[in-house]
Amino acid sequence: MKKPIFWEQAKSDLSYKDKALGKIIRNYPKDFLFSKSDPFYTLARSIVGQQISVTAAQAVWDRLEKKVKSIKPKNIYKTHYMTLKSIGLSRQKIKYLKSLSNAIINKDIKPEKWKNMEDNLIIEELVKIKGIGKWTAEMYLIFNLCRPDIFPADDLGLIKGICKCYNLNYPITKDHAIKLSLKWKPWRSVATWYFWRSLDPIPVEY
């Protein structure tokens, strides 16, 4: 597992600009963001993780991997609805996973071209798929493409991490969070990752 080429520079810059965030960064000297490099894997895992805690998402994902063996579009698509339901997936998430599988099988989306596209254009393309909203698209940009300056302002874990770091009453507004995030540009993905890391015993991954 290789860390992103910008990781050490980002840590240094963020620690210099923001002493409170720097303290979190120093608490996790050996941890870093890494990419699974498989677009379907990242997107499927993001769908599973929608609106539940990191720990709950990990438990469901572990059961999915055990049941399906290999997380590939064709395998998910042909797995029976009741099989997926039995591992703790909601009806909506099963529908979303099938929709994503179908989009990749039929080449309605072509992840290989995203590497050279701008962040906002990738988000626009991804949100056309049923079940993929802006948050899921942002997880893809962070965890698969390792884009350095993504700020998922709708993520409750991120908001909790920010409030905990700065002793703010939870929750702060989305606008307040975005305003605070300007301080962490151009490394907002890295700042986000450390705010998540400060809350969970296991690193977030998608």
Image (tube, rainbow, N blue to C red):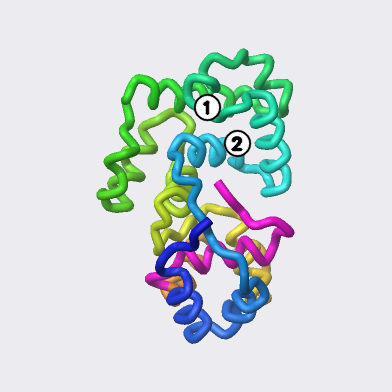
| Mark 2 crowd level (few <14, some 14–19, many ≥20, 10 Å Cα) | many
| Left or right for 89, reference 173 | right
Residue type, mark 1 in image: Leu
User: Which residue appears farthest toward the front when viewing the image?
Assistant: 1
> Magenta part of the protein: which range?
185-206
- Can residue 135 be seen from the camera position used here? no
Query: Does 148 appear above or below 22?
Result: above
Marks 1 & 2, CB-CB < 8 Å contact:
yes
Q: Residue at x 62, y 15 (%)?
A: 81
Residue beneath disc 2: 48
Residue 97 is labelled as: 1
> Residue 152: x and y, percent?
48, 55
Residue 101 placed where, x, y %? 46, 24
**Residue depicted at x 38% and y 70%:** 186
**Foreground: 185 or 11?**
11
Give SS at disc 1: helix
Residue beneath the point at 31% across and 48% down: 115
Badge 1, how many Cα within 10 Å: few under 14, some, many 20+? many
